[in-house]
Image: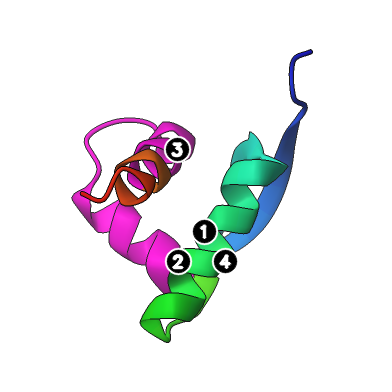
Amino acid sequence: MAELIQRHSVVVSGHRTSVSVEDEFWDEVAVIAARRGISRNALISEIDRDRDGNLSSAVRLYVLRALKGG
């Protein structure tokens, strides 16, 4: 069964935008941010600064790398 992609509002570097990811990825972003002691928006801003392509894809890849220990 395919998971639904949800649009989540964020503030990235002071600008409102949205990230379209599955809830499982969104929840894991919150866990990673909490573990690091930063907000979800701050983590997404970091991901945004380091990305090459689409922000939503960059978020998924960041979470995947984090889960794999990288």
Q: Are marks 1 and 4 in contact (CB under 8 Å)?
A: yes
Colour mapping: rainbow
Q: Residue at x 74, y 15 (%)?
A: 2
**Does the magenta-highlighted stretch encompass residue 52?**
yes
Residue nearer the viewer, 10 or 22: 22
Label 2 Cα crowd, 10 Å radius (few <14 / some 14-19 / many 20+): some
Which residue was labeled with disc 3? 60
Which residue was labeled with disc 2? 32
Q: Kindly report the distance in space between the C-alpha atoms of the residues bearing marks 3 and 1.
A: 9 Å
Residue nearer the viewer, 37 or 68: 68
| Left or right: 59, with 51 as reference point | right
Q: Residue at x 65, y 44 (%)?
A: 24
Residue 69 lies, in percent from the top left, at: 26, 50
Residue nearer the viewer, 48 or 35: 35
Q: Nearer the viewer, mark 2 or mark 3?
A: 2
**Does the magenta-highlighted stretch encompass residue 3?**
no
Q: Are marks 4 and 2 in contact (CB under 8 Å)?
A: yes
Q: Secondary structure at mark 1?
A: helix
Which residue was labeled with disc 1? 29
Q: Are marks 3 and 4 in contact (CB under 8 Å)?
A: no
Amino acid type at mark 1:
Val
Q: Kindly report the distance in space between the C-alpha atoms of the residues bearing marks 3 and 4.
A: 13 Å
Amino acid type at mark 2:
Ile
Magenta segment boundaries in residue numbering: 41-62
Q: Which mark is residue 51?
A: none
Nearer the N terminus, badge 3 or badge 1? Answer: 1
Q: Which mark is residue 30?
A: 4
Label 4 Cα crowd, 10 Å radius (few <14 / some 14-19 / many 20+): some
Q: Secondary structure at mark 4?
A: helix
Q: Kindly report the distance in space between the C-alpha atoms of the residues bearing marks 2 and 3.
A: 12 Å
